[in-house]
Amino acid sequence: MDEARAVPLTEAQSGLWYAQRLDRANPIFNTGQYLDLRGPLDTQALSAAVAQAGVEAESLSLRFIDGPDGPRQLIDPALRPQLQLVDLSGEPDPEAAARAAIRHEMNIAVVPETGPMARQILFRLAPERHFWAQLVHHFAIDGYGMVLLTGRIAELYGLFLAGKETGGPISGGRALAGLSGVWADDAAYRQSDARADDAAWWRQAMAGMDEVIGMAPGKAQSAYTFRRFEAALPPSAREALLARAKDAGLNWPDVLTALVAAYCRRFTGTPGITVGVPSMGRMSAATARAVAMVMNVLPLRVSPDEGAPLGDYLSAVARDTGEARKHGRYRSEYLRRDLGLLGGNRRLHGPLINVQPYDRPPRMAGLEVALHVTGTGPVEDINFTFRGDGTRELSIEVDANPDLYSAAEVAAHGRRLAVFIEAAAQAERLVDVSTATPEEALHELEAYNATAHPVPEGSLTELIARGMAATPDAPALRFGGAEIDYAELDRRTAALAAALRARGVGAEVIVAVALPRSFELVIALVAVLRAGGAYLPLDLDHPAERIATILDSAAPAVVLAQDDPHGLYGTRLLQPADWPSTAPAALAKYPAPDDAAYVIYTSGSTGTPKGVLVTHRAIVNRLLWMGEHYGFGPQDRILQKTPATFDVSVWEFFLSFVTGGTLVVAPPDAHRDPAAIAALIRREAITTLHFVPSMLGAFLDARESDGIAVARVFCSGEELPADLRDRFHGRVTGELHNLYGPTEAAVDVSYWPASADDPSRPVPIGHAVWNTRLVLLDDQRRPVPLGMAGHLYLGGVQLARGYLGRPDLTAERFIADPFHPGERLYLAGDLARRRPDGAVVYLGRADHQVKIRGLRIELGEIEAAIGASGLATANIVLAKDGRLVAYVVPTADYTAEALRAALARRLPDYMVPNALVELDAMPVTANGKLDRKALPEPVFASSGGEAPAEGTEARLAAIFAEVLEREGAISASDDFFGLGGDSLSAVQLLARVREEWGHDPGLAALFEYPDVRGLAAQIDTGNGDDGGDEGLGPLITLVRGAADVAPLFLIHPAGGLGWGYRTLAQAVSRAGAAGRTVYALQSPALDPDAPAPESIDALAADYARRIMQAWPQGPCHVAGWSVGGIIAQAIAVELEAAGRQVGLVAMLDSYPADCWRAEPEPTTSQALRALLAIAGYDPEKYPHLQTRKDILDFLRAGDSALGNLPPRALDGVIRVVLDTNRLIRGHHHRRYGGVLTHVRAGLDHQARPQLTPQLWQVLGTLDSLTVPFLHPQLTGADASALIAPALVERMAACEQVPA
Amino acid sequence: MSTMTLEKLRADIAALLEDAPESFGDDENLMDLGLDSMRAMNLAMQWDEDGVPLDFADLAEAPTVAGLWALLSERQG
């Protein structure tokens, strides 16, 4: 009868309903507030007022029914809230106790099917001090509804008080409106033309919107709680705001919204930002006085031109918000769908800006009232809320997602925003307003850069000479198995240096070195330094034209080379054959610290490479820092494998001579060959080497790198991916260090230990080296606050002198340091942000420079080369996904081959574009600028739109078409929501999937993998079953096989999850002739609401029932790994007792429960650490992860399937893990009448010889196998390849016996 | 409490809509003219400050000059 009265949800409720359905246990949908009441309170009057308001506000007694036609709701008078009294006046700290109690209440998730929607609690702290808390689920109320409700209760309170005094009847005031009007209003709008018009208006307003980027990196998905910073806006800020609004003739809330949006945009680093602006949506007679969920969130796009008058921007935002509100009834959930923004991380807006001028404490007779809001619903990203009337008070609340923002960041936003509002309200232009507060600016400039460290005044030449003299007999240099000691190095370099001096080499004279890796190369470089000159490395592989350009620009006095292939050196050539072997006299005098040490050419935007000139002072600082920081000594053998033209080679060449170690020079082409590098490391006992990260990846992929041990590996040249760091530590023994720096600042200016226990994602570039500053400044060269992206500027002793012969370029990139008179800053052209620990995180290039294979490339240089070819009238070069694409408008002579050939003559191979795209004309925007978005995608390989593959993909595509009522082909990459699917059709889709495959991957998976291919993969892996939204159901299908073949049931190990059997399941399916279905049984206790199992026997009985249900007749095969095997044996006992034929009973390295009773009980920490293994990590590598929080944070930051479970599901896994020990210790085996197949991990159990298969002999007839693996490896691919055929053979044998 | 006149009422609404007072009729629905929740809320709060006995719900329930004036006349006596 109830059901008959139920009505569908309003559109506003529906949006929330589906959000809550994704995570039913999330209590963040509770909204709430409490009033701090000081003074004499009449609790009877308040109770009466609450009761009366509860009758009027029907929404507080809503109950929901989730049926086949979707959710419905009805008013259930039994659920009306009554004031509950809690006396805390006896507590030692009543206020704290009340706050804790309110927090507790807020954390209780409401079950919409049972209610209640609302709770009203009065905490007595003292006779004249009360907290009156109200909690209402968001389905039933919104912010304005809460104001109405509170106002009405306050009004009724006054009336009851007055009535008491006069003894007369209660009358007056205005009752709240009921829900019928709200429902009718909603139904009318659904069917109106206005709705269609609104939808069309929004689609147009949002057309071409950019991807929403948050103020902090990470996935904007509401957690269970939020972080809060709350403060009063200082009166000076409030007054400035009001004055500005008055001056501009605008509403102050609009001005405030505009200023906050401008603040937020500064953190995204994009020209525009889309923020969310809540809209009350109360402009109808039916909703104006109704307590209900009505509000909507409207996306607001702003693109402030910071250099233009601020008034223009404020007016534009006020106008745009006014327009948007006219169409504000159209739900943002639907708009998000219309725009194809469902699934993954795509969203409609970033930060929420909520100005609630109406939200002020109600007036209550005889009481002083203060308002505290405890929750306003999900916090996906960050919400800036302002409450108060503006004239008397205005508070700022910053609520943020704890997964994205730390408490310190939230507080910093609150404090900084107040300062920003005050300054911006008074500014002529936004560009004049700093983002950082003065304290933050000082911190950025000084505190993070306190790197002063004494370094002796001297030259690299002097350091090398001292090193050679210190240990003359020690090995200095090795190449191709040969070795020379320091004495010989000294003699030969001195001799060549003397010859160079004789040719006029001295301070500031350049000597080119064009030699392959060899003893001679190293001798040449050291000799140039000893002669007092600066060396210039030339790459033998570079085109002649490029080498000619460099020689013209650098004008070297001598060229040290084998020969002169292009005829460019002339009389300057000095060949090794002509080098003297003894010096006529000792070399006097070392270079001065500010003399040039080397010149390295890098790509230049104007089409000519530019020579970076580095002084001795700069490189000495870099080398001494490295030697001391990493403790280099005579025992070290450094590998020299980087080409001399890449400045990483500089420390490789010279550090070991400074620290007394041995330099091992790799053969000329070895640096590209992982196998050769691995062999060299082993043969030469290398302790230290360098990789560009992409090359490190290739090295780790090579079979030969397995088990390599070195002291340290340095990475630089490109971003070091966190996954690569983790792969490194899984394969190589040794330290890994991430270094960063441009050629213009003497190789590296920052360092970060990328150690095995470093959970950083991304890996930072870290902290500044000695006597060096890394400063992050905004576009106006003001320091940025912590966490905000800024341009990276470098300062200190390592800066290069500048570009050789290019004072113009030097002045452009090396600017006067505005904060340290007399010093310089180098504009690195990189974007970065600083972490709370001060470490700098690299974010990407700020200009058109790109890095390919670690080499810096100016796209302009390539564009200039294309222009010079005469084959294109216009061109632009872009880097896409690490590849270069040239768009060209061809001339009549153009052919792609001709252009490639022309470019190869001028540019190094890594600068020749990977793809050439011919255009009739360059696309331009309305104002004549190149329209980058209009450039077509290059075709590297196959494009999107691929047809679905036969099988699951094709069947799923057909279901997409059916559910969405679409005709025409659907491709494998088509997105369900992109094709017009919404929450409701999603439910239909999953129902069809279940019909077709017998299980569905759940709503959460659909949102994650909305495309045909992705979802098909989810279906194929059997994720989800029996309603388990996240693959957590008690029975999941790992492989689906023929319906008439007896399936194999695999029983979960300690973690309760069966996913780990996927590989084994596939191997079993492949090993048999008739594709066999493989299921996994998972612990029902993964559902935190389910009771914990009593015992293994109870669990086994439950599992046996499920098995018999899934496979009603024929032999039942069960197997399990570890704890799973113990349970499998118990299931076999149950099945036998039930009279069922039992087939295979296999235990993969399981030992009876009795063995474990003798062991010491594991600690909670040990049990929790098992989660790491379950997630696929090696717990030994993360010894510091001990607490539940540490482990959870670590898992969440990673990309394992386990770590990405919804919080509730992960809680379930933890519960199972912690409970396993109790179950096993309490288990007493019963004998099983059939055969037990035991598979022993033969390589394991050295420490526990008592664990033998024979322990099972008393519990069944033993069939024992051994495989050469460790216990944890048994479910992996290699072990499965051995085990699966053995299992299949035994299952087949059982099946031949008639049942 | 200051007494509200019909002219003052019209002027307040016109200022909010950034329109001339004579540009809309007494029976025109103010919502069609751009009166939205936020604007209405601001006006209601300003009236509350000035002691004018009209609130947000009145604006939503009777969104015409004539309708509001009828309510006012009744309440101002």
Image: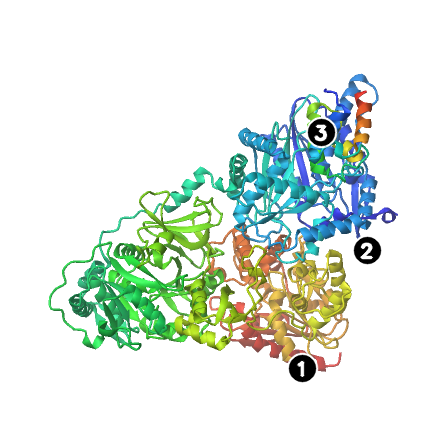
Q: Along the horizontal axis of the image, is A487 left or right of A890?
A: left
Front residue of A128 and A658: A658
Q: Residues within 10 Å of mark 1 (few under 14, many from 20)?
A: few
Dot 3 falls on a residue whose secondary structure is helix
Specify the subunit that label 1 lies on.
A
Q: Along the horizontal axis of the image, is A1116 left or right of A693?
A: right
Mark 1 in CB contact with mark 3 (< 8 angstroms): no
Above or below residue A1190? Residue A603 is below
Front residue of A117 and A1256: A117
Specify the subunit that label 2 lies on.
A
Alpha carbon distance from label 1 to label 2: 44 Å
Of badges 3 and 2, nearer the viewer stands 3
Dot 2 falls on a residue whose secondary structure is loop
Alpha carbon distance from label 1 to label 3: 85 Å
Q: Is residue A848 visible?
A: yes
On the image, the x and y values in percent for residue A219 come to 58, 53
Mark 3 in CB contact with mark 2 (< 8 angstroms): no
Alpha carbon distance from label 3 to label 2: 49 Å
Dot 1 falls on a residue whose secondary structure is loop
Q: Which mark is residue B12?
A: 3
Q: Along the horizontal axis of the image, is A616 left or right of A44?
A: left
Same chain shared by disc 3 and disc 2: no
Mark 1 in CB contact with mark 2 (< 8 angstroms): no
- The residue type indicated by label 2 comes to Asp
Q: Which mark is residue A69?
A: 2
Residue that mark 1 sits on: A1073
Residue furthest to the top:
A166
Q: Is residue A1120 visible?
A: no
Front residue of A736 and A276: A276
On the image, the x and y values in percent for residue A718 come to 43, 62
Residue furthest to the left:
A585
